[in-house]
Each structure stands twice: as structure tokens, then as C-alpha cells.
Image (spheres, rainbow, N blue to C red):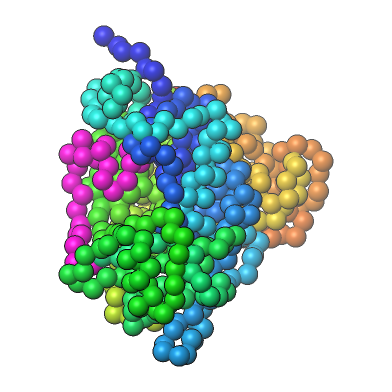
Amino acid sequence: MTQAHDIDVLVAGAGPTGSTLAADLLRRGLSVRVVNKAPHAFEGSRAKGVQPRTQEVLEDLGVLEEAHEQGGPYPLAGIHLGPVTAPWKMQQRSKVTADVPYPNILLLPQHRTDAILHRLLTRLGLSIEYGVALETFEQDSEGVTTTLSTGERVRSKYLVGADGGASAVRETTGLGFAGTTDDSDKTLIIDCTIDGLSRDRWHIWPRASAGACPLPHSDQFQVMIRLKPGDTPNLDHTALADQFHQLTGHKLRDITWTSAFRPNVRLVEHYRVGRVFLAGDAAHVHTPAGAQGLNTGVQDAYNLGWKLGQVIAGAPDRLLDSYEEERLPIAAGVLGKSSELYANLSKHRVSGLKRGDEERQLALTYRGGPLAPVECAQTKTLHVGDRAPDAPCAGSGVHRLFEALRGPHFTVLAFGSAARVLPDLAWPVSGAELRRYDVRSERSSAQGHLADTTGRLAAIYGVEGDALILIRPDGYIGAIVTRDFVTEFNAVAEVFTPR
């Protein structure tokens, strides 16, 4: 007997990953609930670096301006060597370009990132259910029945565990979480005020294994103290103040949040078990080096959201298999990079402080995955599976390509004579819509035209002739078609769309 579904998707966890996923699902018109075991939102600064690719996700969700207002640039490092403080540029400051509008990492305490996403959920009509834990669940071929700590049983089409490194969803699936935890390596994190310490530097005392990063638009610092092997963390506020003073000579006060963490490097064996999915720290945990964990989790959600929406609308179920196939290799690579940076920090190597293009996550690609075979057509600059870059354009109410891409839809750009087939491209009315744009060199007031008067859009996309370029809702190239436009495009569309 078929059981009725209460909702489309139940999300366990209201951190950046779960909140991003919920927001994406809600804007697709799906019914969603978010439960969170903790009694309130997270209150600490912990994951404070928002990478360029994640800023593009926030722009798509309509909250990047708020994030920029509440965040700021990373300061220069100030390395304290006895009486000398040496400046050091940890983050290479890159210039804005036509294809990369947000080239630099944003310093934004995690509790502010959470709050920005939570306000978005409120605007979309969803209230997070705090103090409600997932107890257990059972799934069948048609849905998942979850028992909550309140005693309520919720029937959903899908369940997503975004409930952190100690994920109850992952534990219930029985999936392995391979990796290492170093119990001998502990670090204290403290949000506090520090008297007499300048706010124009990320202060680092390498011999004391301590640091203090000024948090923007406040008088607070995020302090990190790495303990010696065998030391027991003492989170008493007076003890922390005494410890920091002994290590650095500076006094801290007004502590608002503390944490002690051990470096965990773990990766789940599968992201999907039937109708249950894992995302963020529930699927992969990182060292703090390189500001990769939060960003990787947000992009897990961004990859999964549109696929859930399409399959619920009737697209082939195998589209959901591509979530693991695309994201698991990315997480494995990011874990490796994060661990490398952390190892260099452990040995007091300068390379452990340096950050570059790899950490920005703009070059991450799904090339060679199930939705982007290596034999696909390509342009001079792009392959199917690559990030879709921004570009200047005009018309249809936009001035940048990202403005045309913003929203839960697919987008197809038609160059040259390929524009004549735009009306003939098959696309169902259910699921995400397809927005069609004729890219021309001259301006036009007609809807559906984008003017590339400078030729920059075509150059950035590497197009020199006739072509259709399909862009997925998560901002990656879904198809490049250079011949048999209608036939080849419609074949690709069958993978993404409801029957």
C-alpha cells in the first residue's frame, strides 16, 4: 500500500550546508522541513572563510550583498618573532575580471553566514525546528519514514543528512567513514576581545602555536591555540585568558564562544543510500587549513538541490546517482589539499600559510563524470562539466551573464546560426524551466537576446562559430552542441528533465 508523503524533503541539520539545500529546494516550489538537534543556531566564528565559488552560490541565492556587508577581506598576517612583527600576505589579492567577479576569499564568521541563510529561509516561508533530533528512519522504494525526538513520524520522499561530523543520518545508514582522528593534536578556538592588539593583522605567534584573527565589523578576534601533545583542554574563561597571556603577553577578555577540536580527516564511502543522502560534514570532515570544509558542504547542497527537484518532477532517478559521482571525487581532492596545508602548518612551514588559486575552488570541474563524458564537444576554453564563467552582456534586463543565470532554471546560450533552432528545442513544462538566449553582436530590445557588443562573452566561452551551450542550474556547463543542434540538444535534455 502506498503511503502518502507529508513533505518532499526532510533535511537534518541547519548549518550552511542544510540551509543552502533547503533554500534551493524551496525556490523550486518543494515542501521542506529542516530539523536541528541543537536548541539554537550556531554561535561561533568557526568556519570563517567564504571562497569565491561559494560567493557565486550566495549571489545566485540573492544574499551575497548581505554577506559582503557583514564580512570583509582577509588582513595581512603579522608574524611575531620576538620583538619583531613581520608582515606576510597569506591571501593573494586578485583583481576582479569579467569572468571572475569575486576573486578573493571573504572573511565572514560562521554564525553570520548561518544567520544570513536563516533569514533567507524565513523569507521563503520556512522555520527551522530547533531542539528536534533525528532518532531513526526507515526507507522503502517510495519514501523515507523518519522518527524525530519529539515522537513525530515524518514521511518524506527523500531525507538528507547535513547534520555534521557526528551525523545521526550517516550512523543509521551504517556507511563507513574512513579516515583518521588525531587525539593527541588538539586546538582551542576562542571568540573574544583582546586589549591593545591591532586589528589590521592576522597575528601569528609561531613559537607559541597561537594566532588571533580580527573578525570584521566587531571588536572580536578568533583566537586559536594549538596544545602540546598530552595537554588537556581547559575551556574555563579565566584559564584561557591566563594561557593566552603567558603565550603572547596579551590579555583577552569577554569570551563569547569556545571550542576544542581535534583534526579529523574522514570521507564517507557513499553519498547516497536509496532515498537518503549525505552532504557537508556528514559526508566529509577536514582540517581547518585552507577554509575548505564549509565551502565544500555548500557546494554539495548546490549540486544536490536541482537534481532532487528534477527527479521529484519526473526526471530519471539515475540523475541522483550523479550527485555522489560528481561530489565524492571533489571532496577527496579537497581533503588532500586541506591535509597538506595543515601538515605544513604543523611543521611551521611558510607554505602552510600561503593560499592560492586551488583554495578558491573556481577551477573545480565535473569533467569526466557521468554528466560530462570526456568525449563531449568543447570550445577553446571550456569543456562540459566546467564552471560557467561570468561575462559582460546586455539586453533582457541584465548587464552580466550571472544575472541571467540567477535562479533555479537551466539556461541555453545560442551563438551564430544556432539561434534559429531555439524555438525547436524540446523542454518539458514540469521541473526547472529552460531560458533561451540568442547571443548577438548587436543590441536588441527584444526579449531573449543578449548583446555581446565587445565580443568578451564569446571569447570567455571560447566560441568562434555556431554553438549551443547549456548551463545547469548550479552554474556548470551541461552541454556544448556544435552540430545537429536539435537532435543532440534533445538527447542531452532527456538526462536532465522529466519524461
Camera-nearest residue between 140 and 326: 140
Camera-nearest residue between 163 and 333: 163
Camera-nearest residue between 364 and 290: 290
Q: Is any part of residue 92 visible from this angle? A: no
174 is within the stretch colored magenta: yes
Q: Is any part of residue 170 visible from this angle? A: yes
Quarter of the picture containing the C terminus is: top left
Task: Please give the name of the residue rendered at 65% of the width and 44% of the height, measured from the top-left corner.
Answer: 404
Left or right relative to 413: residue 257: left
Task: Please give the name of the residue rendered at 49% of the width and 30% of the height, measured from the top-left corner.
Answer: 127
Furthest toward the top, the residue is: 1
Residue 307 place in picture, x, y as percent: 43, 36
Task: Please give the name of the residue rendered at 52% of the width and 50% of the height, measured from the top-left corner.
Answer: 112
Residue 372 place in picture, x, y as percent: 42, 49
Furthest toward the bottom, the residue is: 83
Residue 31 place in picture, x, y as percent: 46, 24
Task: Please give the name of the residue rendered at 21% of the width and 65% of the height, measured from the top-left corner.
Answer: 232
Q: Quadrant of residue 311?
A: top left
Q: Quadrant of residue 62?
A: top right
Q: Quadrant of residue 445?
A: top right
183 is within the stretch colored magenta: yes
Judge whether 486 appears above or below 197 on screen. Answer: above
- In this picture, which residue range is highlighted in magenta? 160-185
